[in-house]
Image: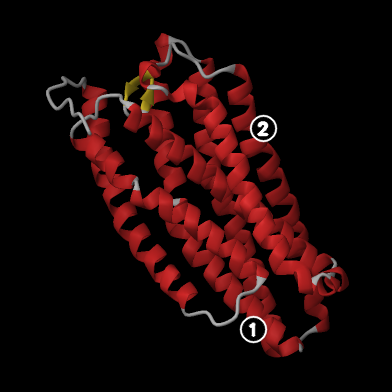
Amino acid sequence: LVDYNCSVVLNHTDAAFRLFERAAYIPVFIVGLSFNITALCIFCRLKRWTDMHIYMFNLLAADFLAIIFLPFRILEAFCPIKPSELCTFLLCTQYSNMYSSIFTITAISIHRFIAVRFPFLTKALASKSKTIAISKCIFIWVIVAVICVINQKDLVKEKLETCYDRILAKKLQNHFILLLEILGYLIPVLVVIFCSTQTIYILVRSLRNVQGRDRAERKKIAAVITANMFTFIVCFTPVHIGLLLQFLSDDSGKDFVHVFLDVAEWIAITNCCLDSIGYYFLLKRVNKINKRSH
């Protein structure tokens, strides 16, 4: 059961931010649901799946789960939900979906880099590529689930001010914040930047050897990879800065940290709308090049 606390008196900052959440989350839900359902329909019509399709479907699954639970966040903006076991579940789901997306995008970046940098190795492992991709995706979900189960005591209702906001005085455990910041963000963002920049460099360098349509396609792929990399940085950097500020701050900076983290979480959820566009067109162009090369 969802227990609301609609009679709560909000200060000026909270009231203004509730208006922001109402205006910000509803379009994300509508657009994200539409895009992800469209992407799901495209996947259902595929006759032949590749390893890249598997990675992208895993990303779609993470994004779709984040979107379908977003109405609770929208309800919270209209009428605050009292902290409960449901809130613990919603926060665990929010973290799980975000880090599943982060790890899957990282896996896609590594896959792309290996395919471009070591084409002969990729061909040698072609028969096992789908099995490898499925294993990686299962491993991602297992790791995320284990982390969430082990650390769910940091998200229990006694440590929540509202359904989506922690009590600032009750900090995340040291090992949990380090896990989120280093394993969940720092390592993935460094891997994404390295793999993406190296892939772009190899594609740009190869332009001297191709002409016409292939040249144009490779330029487009390089542009999409660049856009994906910056989207990853823009979407996931603020929320991890916010989590660190929440961990380090005292009551004097409560309002700023609260607003910063909530805006950062909204920026992170917008990634669900962007993934289904960027990776679909990237896959489409990669497939065109592969068809011409055979």
Q: Residue at x 34, y 64 (%)?
A: 34
* Residue 168 rendering spot, x and y as whole percentages: 42, 15
Quadrant (top left, top right, bottom left, bottom right) of the C terminus: bottom right
Q: Residue at x 41, y 73 (%)?
A: 41
Please, is residue 186 above or below residue 208 in the view?
above
* Residue 50 rendering spot, x and y as whole percentages: 65, 73
Please, is residue 104 above or below residue 5 in the view?
below
The image quarter containing residue 114 is bottom right
Check disc 1 and report the residue beneath it.
Answer: 288
Please, is residue 260 above or below residue 48 in the view?
above
- Is residue 120 left or right of 215 when viewed as pictured? right
Name the one closer to the observer, 276 or 135. Answer: 135
Check disc 2 and report the residue beneath it.
Answer: 182
Residue density around tag 1, few if under 14, some if 14–19, many if 20 or more, within 10 Å: few
Q: Earlier in the sequence, mark 1 or mark 2?
A: 2
Residue type, mark 1 in image: Lys
Q: Residue at x 49, y 73 (%)?
A: 43
Q: Number of callouts in the render? A: 2
